[in-house]
C-alpha cells in the first residue's frame, strides 16, 4: 500500500509503527505522498498500532515488561526517485 516513489524530498514522510510504553515508536514507515493512498495507509497503520498497544497491555497484565528505547524519526530525502532516510556520515 505504501509507495516510496518521489520527485521531490518534500513528498517524503515517515509515520510511527509499534508504539512503545515509554513513548515514541519502535520503527518508522517511510512513504511518498506522490503515489501513496495516504488516507487508506493511515487507517491501516492506526489499526496496526492499536493491535500492538492491546498486545502490550495484555503482556503487562501478566507481568511482562517491555523494553524502552528511543528510535529517532528519520530525516528523509528523495534520492534516485525513492524516499529514503538520510544516512549520517561519521566524520571519524
Image: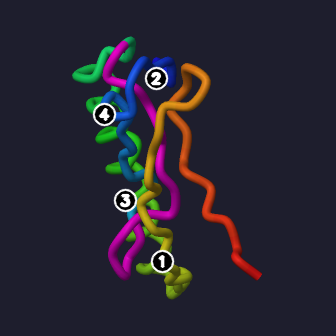
Identify the residue position indicated by label 4 in the image: 10
Seen at 34% across and 15% down, the residue is 34
As displayed, is residue 79 above or below residue 91?
above
- Residue 16 placement (x, y as % from top left): 38, 52
- Residue 88 placement (x, y as % from top left): 61, 63
Give the number of marks. Answer: 4
Q: Are marks 3 and 4 in contact (CB under 8 Å)?
A: no
Q: Nearer the viewer, residue 92 or 51?
A: 92
Callout 3: helix, strand or loop?
Answer: helix
Looking at the image, residue 7 sits to the left or right of residue 50; the answer is right
Front tag of 4 and 1: 4
Mark closest to the chain's N terminus, 2 or 4: 2
On residue 54, the disc is: 3
Seen at 42% across and 18% down, the residue is 7
Q: Marks 2 and 3, Cα distance to the nearest angstrom?
A: 24 Å
Q: In this picture, which residue range is highlighted in magenta? A: 20-34
Seen at 39% across and 33% down, the residue is 9
Q: Nearer the viewer, residue 75 or 17?
A: 75
Q: Marks 3 and 1, Cα distance to the nearest angstrom?
A: 21 Å
Mark closest to the chain's N terminus, 3 or 4: 4
- Residue 66 placement (x, y as % from top left): 53, 80
Amino acid at each position: 500500500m505504501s509507495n516510496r516513489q518521489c520527485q521531490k524530498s518534500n513528498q517524503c514522510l515517515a509515520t510511527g509503527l509499534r508504539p512503545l510504553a515509554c513513548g515514541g515508536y519502535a520503527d518508522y514507515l517511510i512513504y511518498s505522498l506522490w503515489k501513496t493512498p495516504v488516507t487508506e495507509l493511515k487507517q491501516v497503520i492506526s489499526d496496526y498500532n492499536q493491535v500492538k498497544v492491546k498486545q502490550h497491555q495484555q503482556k503487562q497484565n501478566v507481568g511482562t515488561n517491555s523494553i524502552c528505547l528511543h528510535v529517532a524519526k528519520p530525516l528523509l530525502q528523495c534520492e534516485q526517485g525513492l524516499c529514503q532516510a538520510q544516512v549520517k556520515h561519521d566524520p571519524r
